[in-house]
Structure formats: structure tokens, C-alpha cells
Image (tube, rainbow, N blue to C red):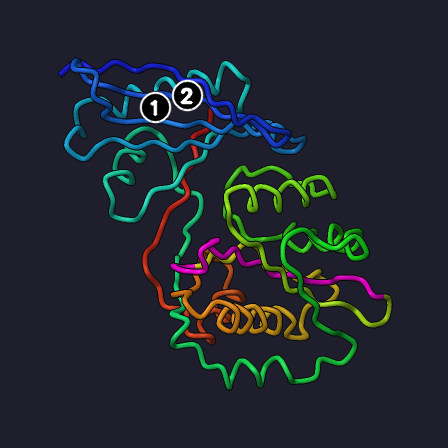
Amino acid sequence: MSVRVTALTDPEADSSGRRLAWLASGADGVPVGSAFLRLFARTGQDHLAELELHVHPAERRRRTGSLLLRAAVAAARADGRRSMITQAEAGSPGEEFLAARDFRKVLTLTYTRLPLADADTEALTGIIERPHPGYRLASWEGTVPDELAETFVLSRHAMDDTPMGSTDIGTITWDLERVRDAAAAVAKRGDLLHTVVAISESDGAIVGFTELVVPGSGQGDAQHYGTGVLPEHRGHGLGRWMKAASILQARERYPELGGLLTDTADNNPYMSRINDSFGYIPTHTTYEFQLDL
């Protein structure tokens, strides 16, 4: 079967980057696959492209994926990109496809889920109420309040040393515009962003945070985003403290919510231990792949 690859226009360009798209279709015009390529635009990541490629199961091994990949690689190189990253679930056809085309594994991510009905509310309450001398918790929904914005932006540096294996991820630079853009993107798709932070009582600065995105319906599963503590404030159990508060808030505010999802790099044992202690159950493993362009 002959396959035609058509370049599409994606109107969703913003200050963080833009996307290119391709649609693969058969001789009858029926779609059989697609590819999206995100070209990051912010300083520190403008060398990077991120690929999302899908082929209908019935159309695999017919060069559809190869044709889509060829188009995406050519576009990334033409744009001066140095690296392309993508993901595939362990044991999937995608893993085999990428490994055969010079992509290399650079990171292993374990995905886990906490069924909220199984969350131990008594234990969570005990963790939250246990004193953490010199610190207090605060939380908000949506965009960070103006009075906390400056130190919240600074607290994002807690993610600077997040284990990323050998991924050529570059430098992610956070400023207030980026923080507000991220919150606006969540709101635009109809979801709810919940943030819990740890605040140093000595100067009122935010020193750690954890974020949870809840579906706008309050049903299904919510997704944990970043969790981090600034290096100089680690060793006080703040990560576990904040995450306990986030879990309990989700259970109390969204009685129809099914569970909480998260993913953790295999070389991040600290966060893995926190998730294990709360009862998160592994669901699958995904590999981050990288192609050097």
C-alpha cells in the first residue's frame, strides 16, 4: 500500500515553542498515522525537538512510521536542532522501532498510581500535623498569588538537579511569565492546577513545592507535576510533607476522583521512596529515547 505524508499547520505556537505536524494516509485517503514535532524556543532549550509519532496498529511494518520519522528528522535538522527526544513504553512496538533507528535510551521512567480510595487518611493527617520547625505549608489553586510569586519562581530552581539520565534536556529557565503561562495552559484545557508549598518562617520565602493537575470534571485520575525542595532546605522531610497535603486535599475536595498518577526516574530513589510510602502502585515503564542530530 502506498502511503502519502502531508505536512499540516499547527496554530498553537506560543512563547515556549511551536509544533510541526504530518499526517500519513493511504491511497484511499484514510489516515494511518501522524507525527508531531515540538520545537522548543526558550533560551537553554532551543537546541531540542520533541517527537510524538503514532501509526495505526494495522498499518505497522509498512514504512508508515519510517516516512513520518524521516519528515520529522529533516525538519528538526533544517531548524538547526541538535537533539530529538521521544518516549516509548517498555516492550512496545515503539521501543523496537526507535531502537532500530539509532535512537538510544537515556532515561527510564516508572509510572505509578495511587487509588484515592486506598489512601490512608489517618496516616496522611499525621504526617501533615507533625511539626516541621521553621517551616509552614500553604496552598492555592490556579496561578500563584502575587504576594508569593517572586519566591515561587525562585523555588523552581529546586528542579535544576532533577535526575534526567543522559538526556540532552538543556537548561529550563523559569521566570514569572513562564510560571503564569504554565498555569494558563492548564486552565485553557479546562483542568485545575493545585499547588502546595513549604514556606520558610525565617523570611517568608517558598522553599519547596508540589503540583497536581485535576481534570475539570473532578473525575478520573489527576496527574502530579513537579515536586522539589531547594537544596539548602533538604533533609527535613518537606517533600513528603507537601505531597501528603496534596493527596489529602485531592481526596477531600474531589470525592469522585479515582486516583493520582505520577512518573519517577529510576535514578531518583528519594522520590520513589516517598511514592512507595504512600502506596503508589507501578503501572508501566517508559523509556526516554534520544536521537543525536
Per the image, the residue denoted by label 2 is: 73
Q: Nearer the viewer, residue 140 or 122?
A: 140
Task: Name the spot of residue 155 as percent of width and height, x first.
Answer: 72, 55
Please say if 216 is above or below 71: below
Mark count: 2
Residue 275, compared with residue 56, is above or below; it is below
Which residue is the site of mark 1?
69
Which of the 4 image quarters holds residue 244? bottom right
Residue at point 41%, 22% (across, down): 21
- In which image quadrant can residue 203 be found? bottom right
Q: Is residue 95 magenta?
A: no
* In the image, residue 15 above or below residue 1: below
Residue 26, image x, y percentages: 19, 17
Marks 1 and 2: in contact by CB < 8 Å? yes
Residue in view at x 31 percent, y 47 percent: 89
Disc ID at residue 158: none
